[in-house]
């Protein structure tokens, strides 16, 4: 058992060392600052600036979380606290099913429904022109994909809150909603945060569905209706042709390394915050 | 089963000598705060409580005793409508509090529950500070004023004898208190919404003897202002603090009477056997 666990961690180490080794050429050629904080992307001139991709990834993820968290939280509250056993039995398999649908199908749905809706109905209210392939489209599709994940984790978290705690609140005359707001959510705060963290990690890495709806345009998006180009999409789109240009392979490996580091840093950071909250409030 | 069980009425302490057929004098205690009428409770078609008729006198301690699984806790929870959320439980009959049927139509459950402070088997503190635990109820009922809240918290913590022990660390998490202190904190939290009745569900079963004694002393001093209903598994506890005792067996209320009556001269054979320790 220990061996297997150690082996798993070793794989992680091997991946990071491999990515670092492969991306060394481009790091040596350009400064790290140049790579991270400039946005000109000219592979033919051997210049790679990743700012567009980093910002695109962050923005798409941010919008997805902004949409997904409130919706999932309310759904989870309904399913765990209000719904009758029958409703639960009917709806829960549906949620499991949603998380089992292949991302490419979400991508197709996004292209056929979300993108035209944004370009025809939503964007005209705010900007002159939008193709619909945009940060927002990516965010919406991503949100739909992570909602089932967040819901099912939060339901588990709620189920772990002792019934006695709810009864304590009810027995001083609190309503169900007050009990949910003031006791249930407080007690499950670490769990809910953990669910959100997991969802964000998943969202960072989601490739195909986002790639299909976000336009893949190498310029920093000015609004949510502009096209964008997240890191995973960059790697997936260009991996086949990377041999033709010098340092291109190395640049894509650097993109992978970036994604890897972002996710690890993010996870470590949120773990710290989570520990702090749990300690501070003794939840 | 005796036929007059269900129409039992209260006697005062002076009536403690059983006089089966003698007419019962109406005293103040004959107007109980809490009346249970024909209460039937079943869980998934299994009947847990059968035709319970019970009257809880005010400003005294009533202990509900009986062997495990006899329905004591179910009865106690019915008084507070804590079964509401369980769709498997079917309840008929009525429970009158201040002459209002809590199972009646259009009855708002929160104000019923506010009238009763519940003390659970294991102390259950909310995941907040000591202060916030006591202030929780008053806040729920709309008290925002800081000084007023502080006053309530101080009063209730004093009432349960916890103030001196915690006054310097009101802001620290309640979970850090000892288990006995936690139970007293729970009691203070229940009292903070000024209930009329205190319901205790084997409230001392998780506590050590010293903490148990403290809680019992508290009950005795609190009965001046509150009506207390305790489910207890330990006969000795009932002997120590009960004014009235209800004995239950297999979902039925077998006998109800003053503590002296039940412990010295129970009318029913089952009660006698239980008190005598033939089964538990």
Image (spheres, helix red, strand yellow):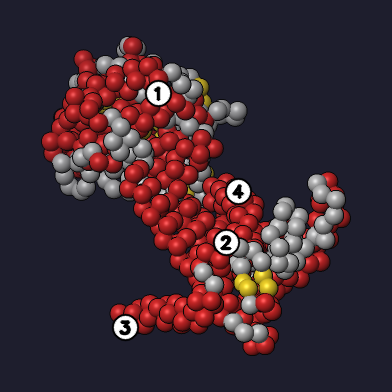
User: Are callouts 2 and 1 both on one chain?
Assistant: no
> Which dot, 3 or 1, sits closer to the camera?
3
Q: Whole-Å distance between the Cαs marked 1 and 4?
A: 33 Å
- Identify the residue at the far bottom of this view: A243
Residue A231 lies left or right of residue B246; in this view the side is right
Q: Whole-Å distance between the Cαs marked 2 and 3?
A: 41 Å
Q: State the SS at label 1.
A: loop
Tag of residue A216: none
Residues B152 and A262: in front is: A262
Q: State the SS at label 3.
A: helix
> Which dot, 2 or 3, sits closer to the camera?
2
User: Are callouts 1 and 4 both on one chain?
Assistant: no
For residue A249, above or below residue B279 = below
The answer for which chain carries disc 2 is A
Residue A213 shows up from this direction: no
**Reading the chain from its start, which is encountered first: label 2 or label 4?**
2
Residue B266 lies left or right of residue B109; in this view the side is left
Q: Residue at x 57, y 46 (%)?
A: A82
Question: Label 3, on which residue?
Answer: A3
**Pointer 3: residues within 10 angstroms few (<14), some, or many (20+)?**
few
Q: State the SS at label 4.
A: helix
Q: Whole-Å distance between the Cαs marked 3 and 1?
A: 57 Å
Q: Residue at x 25, y 21 (%)?
A: B159
Tag of residue A70: 4
**Pointer 2: residues within 10 angstroms few (<14), some, or many (20+)?**
few
Labelled pair 1, 4 in contact (Cβ < 8 Å): no
User: Are callouts 3 and 4 both on one chain?
Assistant: yes
The location of residue A91, given as percent across then percent down, is: 63, 59
**Reading the chain from its start, which is encountered first: label 3 or label 4?**
3
The answer for which chain carries disc 3 is A
């Amino acid at each position: 058992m220990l061996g297997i666990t150690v082996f798993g961690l070793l794989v992680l180490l091997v991946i990071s060392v491999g990515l670092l080794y492969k991306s060394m050429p481009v790091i040596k050629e350009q400064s790290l600052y140049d790579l991270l904080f400039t946005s000109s992307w000219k592979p033919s001139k051997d210049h790679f600036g990743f700012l567009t991709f980093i910002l695109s990834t962050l923005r798409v993820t941010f919008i997805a979380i902004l949409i997904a968290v409130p919706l999932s939280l309310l759904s989870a509250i309904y399913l765990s606290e209000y719904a009758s056993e029958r409703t639960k039995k009917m709806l829960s398999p549906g949620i499991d099913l949603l998380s089992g649908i292949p991302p490419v199908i979400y991508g197709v749905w996004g292209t056929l429904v979300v993108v035209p809706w944004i370009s025809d109905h939503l964007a005209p209210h705010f900007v002159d022109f939008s193709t619909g392939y945009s940060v927002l489209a990516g965010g919406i599709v991503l949100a739909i994909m992570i909602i089932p994940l967040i819901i099912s984790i939060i339901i588990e978290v709620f189920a772990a809150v002792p019934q006695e705690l709810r009864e304590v609140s009810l027995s001083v005359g609190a309503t169900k909603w007050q009990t949910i707001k003031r006791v249930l959510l407080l007690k499950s705060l670490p769990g809910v945060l953990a669910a959100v963290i997991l969802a964000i990690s998943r969202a960072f890495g989601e490739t195909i569905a986002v790639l299909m709806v976000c336009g893949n345009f190498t310029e920093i998006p000015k609004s949510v209706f502009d096209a964008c180009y997240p890191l995973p999409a960059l790697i997936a789109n260009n991996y086949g042709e990377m041999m033709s240009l010098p340092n291109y392979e190395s640049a894509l490996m650097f993109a992978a390394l970036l994604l890897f580091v972002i996710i690890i840093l993010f996870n470590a950071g949120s773990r710290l915050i989570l520990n702090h909250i749990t300690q501070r409030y003794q939840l | 089963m005796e036929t007059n069980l269900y129409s039992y009425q209260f006697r005062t302490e002076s009536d403690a000598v059983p006089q089966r057929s003698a007419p019962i004098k109406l005293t103040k205690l004959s107007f109980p705060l809490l009346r249970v009428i024909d209460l039937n409770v079943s869980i998934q078609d299994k009947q847990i409580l059968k035709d319970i008729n019970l009257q809880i006198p005010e400003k005294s301690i009533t202990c509900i005793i009986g062997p495990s699984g006899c329905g004591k806790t179910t009865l106690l929870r019915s008084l507070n409508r804590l079964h509401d959320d369980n769709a498997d439980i079917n309840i008929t009959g009525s429970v009158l509090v201040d002459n209002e049927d809590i199972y009646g139509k259009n009855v708002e459950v929160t104000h019923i529950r506010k009238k009763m402070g519940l003390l659970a088997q294991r102390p259950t503190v909310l995941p907040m500070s000591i202060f916030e635990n006591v202030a929780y109820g008053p806040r729920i009922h709309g008290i925002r004023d800081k000084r007023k809240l502080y006053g309530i918290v101080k009063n209730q913590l004093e009432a349960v004898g916890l103030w001196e022990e915690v006054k310097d660390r009101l802001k620290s998490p309640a979970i850090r208190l000892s288990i006995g202190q936690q139970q007293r904190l729970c009691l203070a939290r229940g009292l903070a919404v000024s209930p009329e009745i205190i319901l205790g569900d084997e409230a001392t079963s998780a506590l050590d003897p010293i903490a148990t004694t403290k809680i019992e002393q508290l009950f005795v001093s609190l009965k001046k202002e509150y009506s207390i209903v305790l489910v207890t598994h330990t006969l000795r506890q009932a002997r120590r603090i009960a004014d009235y005792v209800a004995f239950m067996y297999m979902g039925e209320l077998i006998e109800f009477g003053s503590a002296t009556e039940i412990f010295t001269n129970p009318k029913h054979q089952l009660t006698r056997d239980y008190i005598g320790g033939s089964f538990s």
